Image (tube, grey):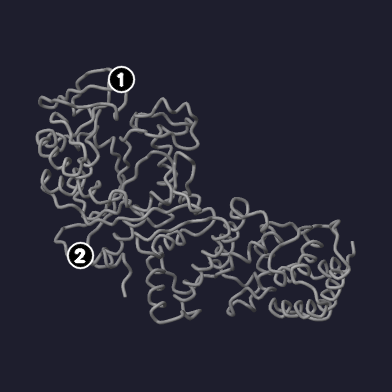
Amino acid sequence: MKHWIERIADDLNEKDVPEHVVASGTSISGSIHIGNSCDIFIANAVTKALKKQGNKSKTIWIADDHDPLRKVPYPLPKSYEKYLGIPYSNIPCPEDCCSNFVEHFEKPLLSILEQFGIELEVFSGAEMYKKGIYDDYIRIALEKAPEIIKIFNKFREHPLKDNWLPYNPICDECGRVNTTYAHGFEGDIVNYSCKCGHKGQMDIKSGNGKLTWRVEWAARWKIFGITCEPFGKDHAASGGSYDVSKIISTEIYDYEAPYPIPYEWITLKGEAMSKSHGVFFTPGQWLEIAEPETLNYFIFRSKPLKHQDFNPSMPFLDFIEQYDRVERIYYGAEEASSEKEEEKLKKIYEASQIEISESMPFQPSYRFMTVAYQIAGNDPEKVYAILKKDSQLPKSMEDKSFSDLDVKDVDRLNRRLSHVKNWLNLYAPEFVKFHVQKNLPRVEINDLQKEFLLKVADILENSDYTPQELHDEMYTIIHELDMKPQKAFMAIYKVITGKKQGPRAASFVLSLDKDLVIKRFKMEE
């Protein structure tokens, strides 16, 4: 069984090329999120798979920063509407912290790619035009405009005009690039008119213009010798960008179109990610709450065209538990449900790792640490003591004190503690949050609840329990008193946190100072 990334590498291995160039590209129209940066993650993974097979390969990333601004991205003010239609590269930085609009939005991504183990060569579309890299391709496109029109018209309901040219000058008057219409040329000079009323000429060597998208895409395939490229499913639609650019690449630029890897959008809590509406989640935000390998896992666990939804709230805890299970299966610490599942999950885990450790990393439970952190605070030694007390450690660590831990284990604990802290502050719903009250809260509980708490206090005074044992003892008392479990556990939370609900009761109780719990259950100040 092979992972889908390996199968793509196998297909590419059949091509007789001196070097594979796996391309990725992103429109710099706002914050770059985990939905539109999939190109980069997939491209990097394919490059690594090719290198593993002994092929020469590299990943490149092209910033589509010469495109026009079509919508004002969140959280920019409405005043930025004055830049609609202007190339991103010509728009000022919204916070005066970077050289321009493009750097402001691409810097947060490029600055963290190393943490994901991603190596790539970065190119700017705007700079490519300014440096004349596209010049020869523009000349070819202008000369062969009638042929390009025929290609476009095969897929269009309304045919293009006979004098249409596949080039958009940037208007000298208004600075916009999506309101101009090129209708004639002589040598390198293109005649155009703009919706603002201006008519002018543009020298293609100035860089103040761009090829229309589907022609530009085909041109850059040949410029870089691109052999493979992931892209969003919209480009892969029948008669869409890839279909048209593929023909242009072959018939106009005499270059075989690269191996396509279309992928499905990632939604956020069921909503399509939108930079203009502020509905997005960035790789940088991911690193605040989890290891980089977990984002790789999220992307690579399913085939690219399978829909995935991301929810950083409660479902995120389930996701991390799923990842941890796959890690345990990889290292043989847990059995998979079948040999087939084991083989599949091991392949996904391998594809997700930046570096594979010789032994299984320390895995403090993310879910349980949301409880431990709220009790012990940002103190790893106290958190470790709670993990140990609550039987949350692997067998190999059960007899180890905090001072016995090696540097890797302490580092892993600290990082997960930091992730948990951020998750609680940023994405945890209110019902997950609690604070152990210093004094007995002023709460109302009935006589049956008081009796339940006294009986639990009594068994805690006389014996030590594991979470499962205490859970069973609590239910024995609940049945003896003929009360509803919800009412019993509500009493526990009320006297400790002042709330009606909280974490799993038995584990929660054992995580706290035993004397404090007994005093509270006896309703003593």
Kind of residue sitting beneath label 1:
Cys
Q: Which dot, 2 or 1, sits closer to the camera?
A: 1
Q: Secondary structure at mark 1?
A: loop
Give the answer, above or below, for where 513 lies relative to 58: below
Residue occupying the far front of the picture: 157
> Which residue is the site of mark 2?
13
Q: Is residue 508 above or below residue 81?
A: below
Residue type at mark 2: give it. Asn
Q: Nearer the viewer, residue 404 or 490?
A: 490
Tag 2, which secondary structure? helix
Disc 2 residue crowd, few under 14, some 14–19, many 20+, Cα 10 Å:
some
Picture coordinates of residue 256 (x, y %)?
Answer: 14, 52
Position in image of residue 464 (x %, y %)? 76, 79
Q: Is residue 153 left or right of residue 197?
A: left
Mark positioned earlier in the residue sequence (2 or 1): 2
Q: Residue at x 72, y 57 (%)?
A: 434
- Tell me where residue 440 sits by quadrant: bottom right
The residue depicted at 65 percent of the width and 76 percent of the height is 391
Q: Nearer the viewer, residue 349 or 265?
A: 265
Instruction: Locate the N terminus by quadrant.
Output: bottom left
**What label does residue 196 carry, if any?**
1
Q: Give the percent coordinates (x, y) of residue 54.
A: 23, 66
Q: CA distance from mark 2 to mark 1?
A: 51 Å
As rendered, which of 141 and 366 lies closer to the eye? 141
Q: Using the image, determine if residue 75 lies above or below residue 306.
A: above
Residue 90 in percent (x, y) is at 35, 29
Q: How many marks?
A: 2
